[in-house]
Amino acid sequence: MNLSVVALDERIDRRGFACGEEALDRYFRECVSQDMARRIASCFVALREAAVAGFYTLSSAGVLATELPEAITRRLPRYPTLPAIRIGRLAVDTKFQGQGLGGILLADAMRRVLRAEVAGFTLIVDSKNERAAAFYEHHGFLRLGRPGTLFMPLASAAKALASLPEFP
Ligand SMILES: CC(C)(COP(=O)(O)OP(=O)(O)OC[C@H]1O[C@@H](n2cnc3c(N)ncnc32)[C@H](O)[C@@H]1OP(=O)(O)O)[C@@H](O)C(=O)NCCC(=O)NCCS
């Protein structure tokens, strides 16, 4: 697939994007640039030719240590909150679903976060429904002690990426 994943900017046309979830479409078409301007989220898009095939957002976040499994916190400093990065929204246009793009976007998010100079212990995602949660579990995310939220420690993400070919 001829594809590039880049930071969203105003030259990219968002109007035709449709993933099948109206709230996500509306957010991407109407709200995401305002969130970027206010430093609430950054947004990255997968472009196929000039068309947006998918997007995701990243924001800094925190998780309560008590929400993580004891097997993980046992090896961490006793801070009440641990640094995290939230994948706030992630979606693939219906024309491109089922072709591996969701997985490519997740891998791209992991690479960007691992390259960042600010540390984060784990990725977290708030899944909108059980189908979305199943997608993240399929990719190795684990349930957090908070309904609808899943996490993947960045050390695990780095191991998962090591077995994938470099993209894009
Ligand atoms: C969920 C979504 C992002 C998946 O993207 P996609 O490009 O269609 O998924 P992919 O083709 O990358 O699927 C990758 C793998 O995940 C699996 N998968 C996809 N959706 C899944 C689901 N709901 N449950 C379990 N596994 C799933 C696929 O079988 C595939 O497995 P494989 O790599 O072993 O072959 C996309 O369908 C979408 O945008 N849906 C609407 C918006 C949404 O619900 N977003 C969720 C985040 S809030």
Image (cartoon, rainbow, N blue to C red):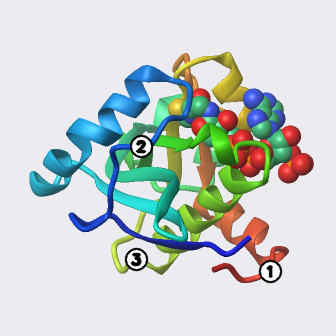
Q: Earlier in the sequence, mark 1 or mark 2?
A: 2
Looking at the image, which residue is at 40% across and 77% down? 116
The x and y percentages for residue 57 are 39, 51
Q: From the viewer's perspective, is residue 64 above or below residue 51?
A: above
**Label placed on residue 16:** 2
Left or right of residue 38, residue 116 in this image: right
**Most extreme residue toward the right, as rendered?**
163
Q: Identify the element where label 2 is drawn.
A: loop
The x and y percentages for residue 132 are 64, 28
Give 65 or 132, whichever is nearer the viewer. 132
Q: Quadrant of residue 43?
A: bottom left
Looking at the image, which residue is at 33% across and 44% down? 15
Label 1 with label 2: CB-CB less than 8 Å: no
Looking at the image, which residue is at 21% across and 64% down? 10
Q: Earlier in the sequence, mark 1 or mark 3?
A: 3
Q: From the viewer's perspective, is residue 100 above or below residue 141?
A: below
**Most extreme residue toward the left, as rendered?**
38
Q: Which residue is mark 1?
A: 165
**Label placed on residue 116:** 3
